[in-house]
Image (cartoon, rainbow, N blue to C red):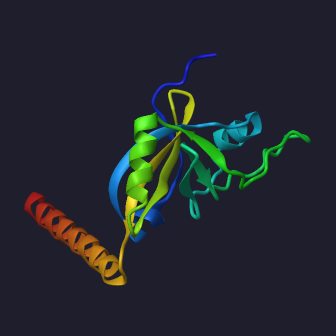
């Protein structure tokens, strides 16, 4: 069996980038059972309600939905169990101190395989206000309109 190379995205949390200002990102490993890995290899997971909590000098990933493996037996995992994250002690301490500040939280951004190992990208984030969300959407629309105008001008120049 050939060794996997590169990054294969399983799930992404697009809502997190809309709801939070991303301050800092970390890549960390996950402690998974066999049926969880098989279910993830099928590309099935949801990070929508996920969050990270620091408990007793360990980081735990909560509310991430990894559906049960279809060919699993009685050894199947529960879909929303908490999963331990693998981080260096200094990173855990830094995340814990920052997340204690008012308005800060730790959210998962992406779940993927990197060189055959399951990884999750987490972010230290601060919640956006409603007007911040509107401003972000407005900037995104303005960028899109500018790109369309530029591409239209280029098309006219070629013709």
Count how many numbered circles sit on residues in the image. 0
For this orientation, the residue located farthest to the left is: 157
Q: Nearer the viewer, residue 24 or 53?
A: 53
Quarter of the rendering occupied by the C terminus: bottom left
| 8 vs 142: above or below | above
Q: Residue 3 lies in what quarter of the image?
A: top right
Q: Residue at x 87, y 39 (%)?
A: 75
For this orientation, the residue located farthest to the front is: 56
Q: Position of residue 90 (x, y in %)?
A: 40, 37
Q: Position of residue 155 (x, y in %)?
A: 16, 62
Quarter of the rendering occupied by the N terminus: top right
Q: Nearer the viewer, residue 157 or 148?
A: 148
Q: Position of residue 112 (x, y in %)?
A: 52, 41
For this orientation, the residue located farthest to the top is: 1
Q: Quick check: 147 left or right of 128?
A: left
For this orientation, the residue located farthest to the bottom is: 131
Q: Quick check: 155 left or right of 34?
A: left
Q: Residue at x 48, y 25 (%)?
A: 5
Q: Residue at x 31, y 83 (%)?
A: 131
Q: Position of residue 18 (x, y in %)?
A: 40, 69
Q: Quick check: 155 left or right of 126?
A: left
């Amino acid at each position: 069996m050939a060794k996997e190379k590169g990054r294969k995205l399983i799930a992404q949390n697009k809502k997190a980038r809309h709801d939070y200002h991303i301050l800092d990102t970390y890549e960390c490993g996950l402690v998974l059972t066999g049926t969880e890995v098989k279910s993830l290899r099928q590309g099935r997971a949801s990070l929508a309600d996920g969050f990270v909590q620091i408990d007793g000098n360990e980081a735990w990933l909560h509310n991430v939905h990894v559906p049960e493996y279809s060919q699993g037996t009685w050894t199947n995992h529960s879909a929303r169990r908490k999963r331990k994250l693998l981080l260096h002690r200094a990173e855990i301490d830094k995340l814990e101190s920052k997340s204690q500040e008012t308005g800060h939280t730790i959210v998962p951004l992406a779940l993927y395989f990197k060189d055959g190992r399951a990884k999750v990208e987490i972010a230290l984030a601060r919640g956006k206000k409603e007007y911040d969300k509107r401003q972000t959407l407005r900037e995104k629309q303005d960028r899109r309109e500018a790109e369309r105008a530029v591409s239209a001008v280029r098309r006219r120049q070629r013709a």
